[in-house]
Amino acid sequence: MKLLSFVLPLLLLLSCAAYKDVSAPKVSELIKANGTKEQLFLRSNEWAIRAFANPQCEIQYNDKNEGKIIGKFLMNTKNDPYFLSDVFSVITITVNDKIARIEIDPLPWKYSRLSLYISIYKPETAQKDMHKLVESYKAFMESHSSGSDQLVSR
């Protein structure tokens, strides 16, 4: 009984300390593109529809008059038992005449300290993935054809 009264609190303490919150800095880029606010909004909306192809991704807000699109994007999905959550980011696109801004703000995620560090989705990897998304958006916006296939798919 004494052993149980010692081990139980120890297990609770260890289980609480075994998880680590991870996050990455936001990525933001201003893009010059030919077109009116309406044209850039429609092009941005089309990019978002194509890029957010995974069922867990969704466009949560879009307003043509405001020139704003906000969506939740799946950056990485849990693929090992120690990785505790999918990794999402909030993507905000704002357009005006001849200019567009994309901001990718990753939401914090968790992993177990018991996992091998090489198996987790690292902040550096998240940064690379966010920059790939920005490049995909930039290429799509700079292209004149709306049927471009230069998209990042998940």
Image (spheres, rainbow, N blue to C red):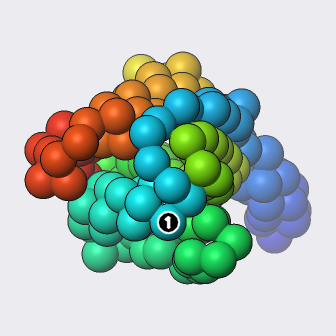
In this rendering, the answer to whether 122 lies above or below 1 is above
Residue 42 pos. (x, y %): 40, 66
Residue 153 pos. (x, y %): 22, 49
* Residue 120 visible within the image: no
SS for callout 1: helix
Residue 136 pos. (x, y %): 33, 36
Q: Which residue is mark 1?
A: 38
Q: Nearer the viewer, residue 25 or 116?
A: 25
**Residue 20, quarter of the rendered image:** top right
Residue 48 pos. (x, y %): 38, 61
Q: Nearer the viewer, residue 23 or 47?
A: 47
Q: What residue is at 78 percent from the left and 54 percent from the top?
A: 16
Q: What residue is at 71 percent from the left and 31 percent from the top?
A: 25
Q: What residue is at 50 percent from the left and 66 percent from the top?
A: 38
| Quadrant where the image shows the N terminus | bottom right
Q: Nearer the viewer, residue 44 or 61?
A: 44
In this rendering, the answer to whether 88 lies above or below 27 is below
Q: What residue is at 54 percent from the left and 20 percent from the top?
A: 124
Q: Name the kind of residue labelled 1 in the image.
A: Glu
Crowdedness of circle 1 by 10 Å Cα count: few (<14), some, many (20+)?
some
In this rendering, the answer to whether 10 lies above or below 126 is below
